Image (spheres, rainbow, N blue to C red):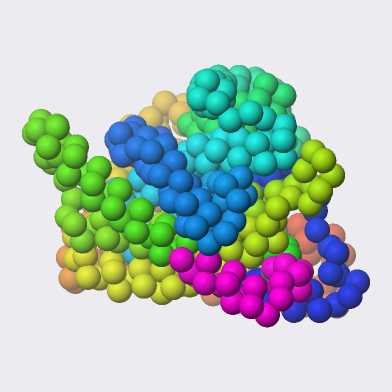
């Protein structure tokens, strides 16, 4: 809300009123990076486990939502072409917005919602491309043409995504340099998106498939140094891209409002809220209808184990946020059609999209915590249990391998004993039973971590004093400080895991 407001306020500056990216660059600049990072950090296991639900919500629900929004917009006077453009822009949910609410939902809910947010963009942008093409007079709307576009979009998207991921992995095998490795990571989603444009496949699916493959294979190839830089860069980069997108929309909304008369602004606002209610109603009806249809057709015991409560479906309805993809699609609408005339109702499409996105992120975002509490989700500690299992198994295997590894490296016995003692202490901490009382091993680890953090702070103060006294150079300060920072971050994360 603050970023949209900032963009709207900047629109009062005459020199900034015309600031915008060309429509043909909107999707290329924002979508590849945002979707790629979401794909890399998604769980392929969760996608497989919930494949049927993900496919249904990513295809049928998207098409139904686009149709319903288009019908409402057309009933309010918008021509069918722009109405379908608006419907396609608002049909997909946003994976990034859902991820911000992850602490409120169970792992299964988050897996389905994030997977839906990644895949449904492909269906929505196919509908969007057809609607824009028909409106500007570049495409003919026939069943055969649309069917071919869907086949090319999904089939070509998956194959192209696999090809891009394979090529990126081959390059990464031969790169140890931190900057070159991260440069390849940065270029991969944009190369995937551009390849999709060349073969007319779904750029979204190409990027998502490439990201999923890289996320699966990357841990075997990527070094720790490359991974640390990549996580910091992508976290900040995607945050700034989202921020820039909301500011641009704020600018565009302010420009759109100036193009309306007083009564038109009121009519546009009414349309926006009507569209928002329609989006929520269609999502709720589909989630309930599809669940009971599957329940009636599939009576297998395995299916019964996967059933969720009706309250859970209400929460999934509330969690259907719209975000960056919808905004990028609205801003990517061309300004003119083939005849040179202005694209009909482009300002209205941008305005309605911005209002609906804002309302979903605010009204639904504020409602989601209460809805999650009302649903009475069981406590979900599966991630924590699996983390402890992974650390426990890895530590035990390392202890078994310690003598052989020490022999290969020629390590002195006293160093081996020190390493074994540290690993045994860590294993004791991992094996400590869960309970209300804090285990002795946990208390000792807390105390040791606090002490080491305090010592690090003292060392940092000493190094800065030496720099101020001109005993060491600024370059030396930066080198020592970098090591202290790495150690502090490691200890801080350990302390967070203990808490």
Query: Residue at 60% of width from left, 22% of height from top?
Result: 160
The stretch drawn in magenta includes residue 255: yes
Query: Residue at 84% of width from left, 63% of height from top?
Result: 19
The stretch drawn in magenta includes residue 174: no
Front residue of 275/180: it is 275
Tell me the quarter of the picture where residue 98 sits. bottom left
Left or right for 436, reference 228:
left
Left or right for 422, reference 66:
left
Residue 77: x %, y % from top left: 57, 59
Count of marks placed on residues: 0
Locate the N terminus by quadrant: bottom right
Locate the C terminus by quadrant: bottom left
Query: Residue at 50% of width from left, 25% of height from top?
Result: 143
Classified by dominant secondary structure, the portion drawn in magenta counts as helix
Left or right for 97, reference 235:
left
Q: Residue furthest right?
A: 15
Stretch of the chain drawn in magenta = 253-274
Residue 42: x %, y % from top left: 45, 43
Residue 172 visible somewhere in the drawing: no
Residue 260: x %, y % from top left: 71, 72
Residue 397: x %, y % from top left: 34, 34
Residue 121 visible somewhere in the drawing: yes
Q: Is residue 227 above or below residue 96?
A: above
Q: Is residue 141 above or below residue 286?
A: above
Front residue of 61/101: it is 61
Query: Residue at 43% of width from left, 51% of height from top?
Result: 68
């Amino acid at each position: 809300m603050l970023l949209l407001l900032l963009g709207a306020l900047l629109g009062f500056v005459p020199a900034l009123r015309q600031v915008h990216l060309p429509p043909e660059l909107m999707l290329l600049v924002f979508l590849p990076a945002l979707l790629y990072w979401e794909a890399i950090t998604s769980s392929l296991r969760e996608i497989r486990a919930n494949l049927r639900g993900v496919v249904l919500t990513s295809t049928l629900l998207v098409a139904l939502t686009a149709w319903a929004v288009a019908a409402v917009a057309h009933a309010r006077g918008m021509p069918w072409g722009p109405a379908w453009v608006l419907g396609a822009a608002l049909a997909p949910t946003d994976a990034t917005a859902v991820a911000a609410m992850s602490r409120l939902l169970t792992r299964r809910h988050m897996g389905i919602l994030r997977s839906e947010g990644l895949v449904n963009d492909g269906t929505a942008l196919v509908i969007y491309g057809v609607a824009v093409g028909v409106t500007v007079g570049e495409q003919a709307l026939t069943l055969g043409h649309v069917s071919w576009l869907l086949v090319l979009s999904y089939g070509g998207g998956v194959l192209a995504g696999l090809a891009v991921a394979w090529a990126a992995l081959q390059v990464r095998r031969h790169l140890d340099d931190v900057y070159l490795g991260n440069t390849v990571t940065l270029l991969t989603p944009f190369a995937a998106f551009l390849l999709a444009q060349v073969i007319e496949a779904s750029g979204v699916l190409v990027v998502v498939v490439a990201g999923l493959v890289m996320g699966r294979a990357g841990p075997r190839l990527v070094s720790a140094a490359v991974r640390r830089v990549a996580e910091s860069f992508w976290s900040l980069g995607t945050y700034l891209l989202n921020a820039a997108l909301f500011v641009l929309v704020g600018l565009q909304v302010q420009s759109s409002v100036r193009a309306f008369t007083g009564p038109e602004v009121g009519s546009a606002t009414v349309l926006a809220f009507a569209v928002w209610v329609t989006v929520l109603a269609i999502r709720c009806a589909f989630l309930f209808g599809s669940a009971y249809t599957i329940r009636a057709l599939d009576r297998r015991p395995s299916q019964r184990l996967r059933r969720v409560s009706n309250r859970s479906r209400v929460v999934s309805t509330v969690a259907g946020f719209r975000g960056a993809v919808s905004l990028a699609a609205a801003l990517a609408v061309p300004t003119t059609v083939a005849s040179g005339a202005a694209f009909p109702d482009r300002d209205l499409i941008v305005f309605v999209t911005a209002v609906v996105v804002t309302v979903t992120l605010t009204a639904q975002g504020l409602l989601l915590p209460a809805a999650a509490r009302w649903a009475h989700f069981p406590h979900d500690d599966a991630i924590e249990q699996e983390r402890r299992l992974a650390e426990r198994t890895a530590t035990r295997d390392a202890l078994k391998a310690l003598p052989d590894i020490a022999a290969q490296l020629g390590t002195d016995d006293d160093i081996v004993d020190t390493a074994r003692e540290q690993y045994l202490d860590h294993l004791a901490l991992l094996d400590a039973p869960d309970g209300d009382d804090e285990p002795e091993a946990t208390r000792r680890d807390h105390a040791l971590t606090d002490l080491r953090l305090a010592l690090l702070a003292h060392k940092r103060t000493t190094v800065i004093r030496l720099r101020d006294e001109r005993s060491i150079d600024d370059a030396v300060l930066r080198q020592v400080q970098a090591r202290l920072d790495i150690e502090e971050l490691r200890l801080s994360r350990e302390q967070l895991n203990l808490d």
